[in-house]
Image (cartoon, rainbow, N blue to C red):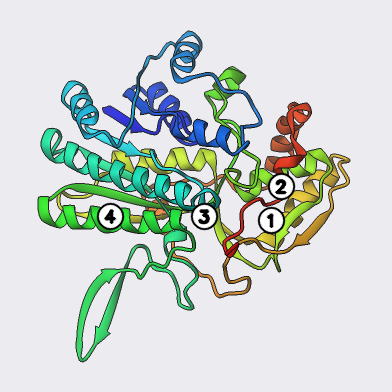
């Protein structure tokens, strides 16, 4: 299959490109390096140095014998995207090309505008490129479980049936993002749903929980193929922050009470989920929504797991509750359905002590590059 990946330089985009190329797909990636630039602007560089996309592609070909095509450019540029669609004619497009950080989106006006403009205009340009040049192309969009917020009812898989006034209908499950970033994801879903209804597009929207992990089968061949791994307060996911803090001897920073519950998954399972979705497209004119995670934990439970694994390696890991910089419920009901991907064949990698120990050992190899100034939160939701 010809597969175009938007945001191919990202934490998820690059591993996805390698995984699909190894399996025999014709893969092309496009990225503007926005995430790299704003990480530098905020002093939030990745722990592990990552080559640029052209060099990554060459390293990958030398190791695995497979080619990944590369375009450096803005995915929100409709003319550029149209030319790429016209030339490459993808059968599936995987959309990762969004500013991915909730804290970044809450820094101030300029960061909020960057997030809004990039995320919505990229989705909008993609929709039109598919409509004009790839009507049969399957859009696989990475959403987020954060779209749903923390409602006091079970979170269904994208849709909910409502009975009102003696009648019933099916609607998108109510969304209530906890940051501007999450809100742009909500707007993405609304845009996709409108154009699915209007033009009969084929779309899978994957509501993904926080991802953890450093390596995949492909990157194990050569460390130059590792994904970008952020551990700071702006771009680092909670698990990745905890891993680095454990290695650096810094108490794990649990925000507030630590009872916030989310659904987590291994980076390797992201690759599985995207491939399963790609290989089993919904019918034309359907917006399929799948909740993409494998296990639910509170932040406290996550910290306890990292602490146990770290202490098993002699790291003497401690935990510190700090004032929560975010505006969120710290105690809440949370029960999200996630059967769709399991029914498609997902075989989960669960968060065992062995998995944690392996990740801690990899991080330890880069201990000298850890910058302690990036650990504590620098962005507050209610700063004004």
Q: Quadrant of the N terminus?
A: top left
Which is in the foreground here, disc 3 or disc 4?
3
Which is in the foreground here, disc 2 or disc 3?
3
The Cα–Cα distance between marks 3 and 4, rounded to whole angstroms, is 30 Å
Give the secondary structure at mark 3.
loop
> Counting residues from the N terminus, which is met first, the one under dot 2 or under dot 1?
2
The Cα–Cα distance between marks 3 and 1, rounded to whole angstroms, is 25 Å
Give the secondary structure at mark 4.
strand
Q: Which mark is residue 288?
A: 4
- Mark 4: few, some, or many residues within 10 Å (few <14, many ≥20)? many
Mark 3 vs 4: CB contact within 8 A: no
Mark 4 vs 1: CB contact within 8 A: no
Q: Quadrant of the C terminus?
A: bottom right
> Counting residues from the N terminus, which is met first, the one under dot 2 or under dot 3?
3
- Mark 1: few, some, or many residues within 10 Å (few <14, many ≥20)? some
Q: Which residue is mark 3?
A: 106
Q: Which residue is mark 2?
A: 242
Q: Which mark is residue 302?
A: 1
> Counting residues from the N terminus, which is met first, the one under dot 3 or under dot 4?
3
């Amino acid at each position: 299959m010809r597969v175009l990946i938007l945001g191919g330089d990202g934490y998820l985009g690059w591993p996805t490109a390698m995984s699909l190329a190894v399996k025999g797909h014709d893969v092309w990636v496009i990225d503007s390096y926005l995430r790299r630039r704003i990480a530098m602007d905020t002093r939030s560089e990745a722990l592990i140095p990552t080559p640029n996309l052209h060099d990554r592609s060459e390293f990958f070909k030398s190791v695995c014998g497979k080619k990944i095509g590369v375009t450096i450019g803005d995915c929100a540029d409709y003319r550029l995207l149209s030319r790429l669609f016209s030339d490459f004619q993808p059968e599936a497009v995987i959309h990762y090309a969004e500013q991915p950080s909730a804290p970044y989106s809450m820094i101030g006006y300029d960061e909020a505008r960057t997030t809004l403009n990039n995320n919505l205009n990229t989705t909008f340009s993609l929709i039109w490129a598919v409509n004009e040049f790839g009507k049969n192309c399957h859009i696989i969009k990475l959403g987020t479980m954060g779209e749903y917020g923390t409602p006091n009812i079970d979170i269904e898989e994208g849709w909910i049936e409502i009975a009102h006034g003696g009648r019933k209908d099916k609607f998108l499950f109510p969304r209530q993002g906890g940051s501007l970033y999450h809100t742009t994801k909500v707007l993405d879903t609304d845009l996709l749903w409108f154009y699915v209804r209007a033009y009969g597009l084929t779309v899978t929207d994957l509501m993904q929980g926080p991802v953890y992990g450093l390596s995949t089968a492909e990157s194990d061949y050569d460390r130059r193929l590792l994904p970008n791994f952020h551990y700071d307060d702006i771009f680092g996911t909670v698990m990745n922050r905890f891993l680095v803090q454990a290695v650096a001897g810094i108490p794990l920073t649990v925000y507030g009470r630590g009872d916030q519950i989310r659904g987590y998954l291994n980076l390797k399972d992201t690759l599985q989920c995207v491939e399963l979705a790609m290989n089993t497209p919904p019918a034309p004119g359907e917006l399929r929504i799948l909740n993409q995670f494998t296990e639910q934990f509170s932040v406290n439970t996550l910290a306890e797991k990292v602490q146990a694994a770290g202490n098993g390696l002699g790291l003497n890991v401690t935990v510190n509750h700090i004032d929560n910089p975010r505006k969120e419920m710290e105690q809440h009901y949370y029960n999200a359905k996630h059967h769709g991907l399991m029914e498609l064949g997902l075989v989960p990698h669960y968060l065992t002590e062995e998995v944690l120990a392996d990740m801690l050992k990899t991080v330890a190899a880069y201990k000298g590059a850890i910058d302690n100034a990036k650990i504590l939160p620098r962005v507050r939701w209610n700063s004004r």
